Amino acid sequence: MKKTGSIVLITAMLALAGCSGSGSGSGSNSGGAPADINAKSEGVMTYAEYDAAALDTKVTVETYVQAKQSWWDNKATLYTQDADGGYFIYDMPISEADYGKLKDGTKIKVTGYKAEWSGEVEIVDAEFAIENGSYIAQPIDVTDLLGKDDLVKHQNMKVSFKGMTVEAAGKDDAGNDVAYLYNWDGSGTRGNDLYFNVSKDGNTYTFTIRAYLCNEDTDVYKAVEALKIGDVVDLEGFLYWYEGPNPHITSVTAAK
Amino acid sequence: MRRWLSILLSALVSCTLLGGCHGSRGMAAFVIPEQLDESRTFELTFWAKNDTNKNQTKIYENAVASFQKLYPNIHVNIRIYNDYGKIYNDVITNIATNTTPNICITYPDHISTYMTGDNVVVALDELFDDEEYGLGGSQLKFDGVKEEEIIPQFLEEGVLAGKQYALPFMRSTEAVYVNETYVKKLGYDLPEIMTWDYMFEIGEKAMTKDAAGNFTLNGQKVMIPIIYKSTDNMMITMLKQKDAGYSTEEGEILIFNDTTKDLLRMIGGHAATGSFSTFQISSYPGNFLNAGQCLFAIDSTAGSTWMGSRAPLSDISPDKIVDFDTAVRMVPQFDVNNPYMISQGPSVCLFNKADPQEVLASWLFMQYLLTNEVQWGYAETEGYVPVTSKAQNSEEYQEYLSLSGTDSDHYKVKIDASKLLIDNVTHTFTTPVFNGSTSLRDAAGQMVESVVKSVRRKETIDDAYFDKLFKDMNALYRLNETGAVNTSKEDLGPLPPASKALLISLALIWAMIIAWYFYDQNKRRKAASKQ
């Protein structure tokens, strides 16, 4: 897709902890967190209030880091989630030192503006504060929602897809079908985003390994490079949106 | 006395020279070898950029393959980037470790930063003129382009500080991709050259909604009539058309002026109604255009294959694409009789290495990129234009243009976009290049983005807002700290101790030279009078 390599310039630091070859979700509180992750401080929106807020309005949420996509030029892009929904934090000003303090599960209070870019709802021009608490979300199985309108309700959340069959993503120079492409049309090289197609019940979907999130050294990147057409796999990732669902996959394993 | 003075002067000169070397990153200037040593093998690195377009990658690969048939000992390893900014950052990082590529695609603005290290980038003037290996040289194994065959305006864009540091590779400009069907539906004819007023007027007309809240023009919930991809270009082009300040050739910053405020007010007014937005805020103009949700999508001619309901490339699903006629026009103007449009596109620069033979081998490949086959091939992947008259005027390229609309390889919108630049080269302009010009360009775009965001967030746009915006832009992009010179006078603080010591030493030396001169003259007079 054209967005690749266009908006976020580069990633200077990658947080690869969220990229694995196996399931990573624990669905747990950890690190001495408050017991109730649904509790919100005064002046903080619930997910329902955030969801209902108009675009371009100021929003304040308390949420938990699920993965760090990139840090560059004192800005970070984060996948975050609370008990009820996902919040994609785009280009949040943050020092490199503070970025290092953000771990998977870290609770942060974010104030910014609600925006939408090609269908992806995000918080931009944000300020943040680290708070006491930790929560790592369990992936929600959304396999049955593929192709349905309700899928968008899980936008930006950690999700899983079960029993997906790998389909041809394109052709190589010799005209043979291939299971994945570097960049959406195969114009890239190793280190660029990976695109691959998987099907379920006769419908085919395009999934992405976002190199900023999971680079070529991660298990998941290598796992996709090892895919064969016809493989049946379970997948986990974040339900990103670009002109429709465009999951950023963090885990690929053989279907159980 | 003379010996003492000589020692003192030598010491001072040495001190000054050594001081000048402190912290510098540089190497000896490149000297052209007399002959390419073809008994050696060279491993070159070429950092190339494509527009996430597989065909462009193929063109690069084919260029390397055909070059290596001619020069089997020169191996060119390509690294493909999708982003000029990433190349820029990687080059900066690699200058510090002397691991730059041999050749890379770049913007002249970026080269000005690369040049902060001594002899990092090779000036091409002497290479151009070299009889054996220069442009059209006798020892070339290919039909090289001659200097006079490179379009002069494009060549001029690579001149920095009086020397040629960049070779143009491809050129593009910006175009308005118009949903002509909707423009006519609103009761307007589309002129050959649009004004800003015309475009904004139609944009406002398109905002009418029906009782159900759908836009009457497209029957959809979404309509952004005007979307600009590169807001830095938008501001720069508007200022040029207004003959208003942006910067001087020397790097004096002039952008923070009343015309800029007026333009931002105008843009903000249309953002407030929802008739104008930007790529950064909404998304790719082409996505909205193709979905029938935009009338005027302003983007590079190098993105033309994504534009229009029959575009060969698309990011939106086929069921969202609306059928309409696409017209290609020059960016809007304030004075249609004196139009200006930006010239942009990739250039190539050559990095210096300790081994002059390696640099010469790199130069040969760099020239090869201007041969007809490479120029035609790459230009035809998008709405680019070859940078040589030799390629442009060739029968092959003219035939390509003449086949407009016959198939997807000859997509009409793409060829119209190329023709737009070919027919209007004399109306193109570029901005001055200096150390800091990249930051100034960023600031120009960011001001548009900030104003659009602010009005969408219902903030007040008044003089106080602009005062703060200008101050913030100055600070954010460090426009006072680069090679750029800001018009606002700032206290630079006391001189550093080393500078003070140097100035005092110089003053003392001059005092001693003058004293010695009078002493010597007096002595000569006395000697003469004795005789």
Image (cartoon, helix red, strand yellow):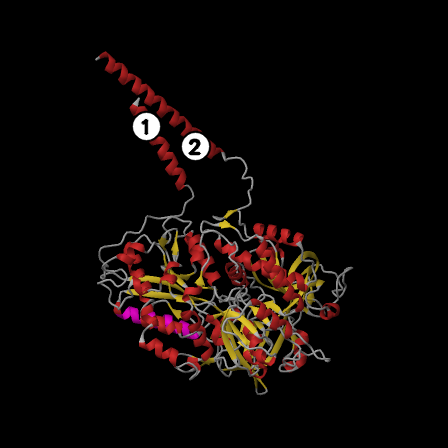
- Type of the residue with mark 1: Ile
Picture disc at residue B502:
2
Q: Residue furthest top?
A: B530
Q: Residues within 10 Å of mark 1 (few under 14, many from 20)?
A: few
Disc 1 secondary structure class: helix
Chain of the residue under label 1: B
For marks 1 and 2, give the CA distance: 17 Å
The stretch of residues the image draws in magenta is B54-69
Closest to the camera, between mark 1 and mark 2, is: 2
Residue A121 pos. (x, y %): 65, 69
Is A93 located above or below residue B182 in the figure? above
In this view, the residue in front, A150 or B351, is: B351
Q: Residue furthest bottom?
A: A202
Left or right of B116, for residue B137: left
- Which residue is label 1 attached to? B7
Residue B64 part of the magenta segment: yes
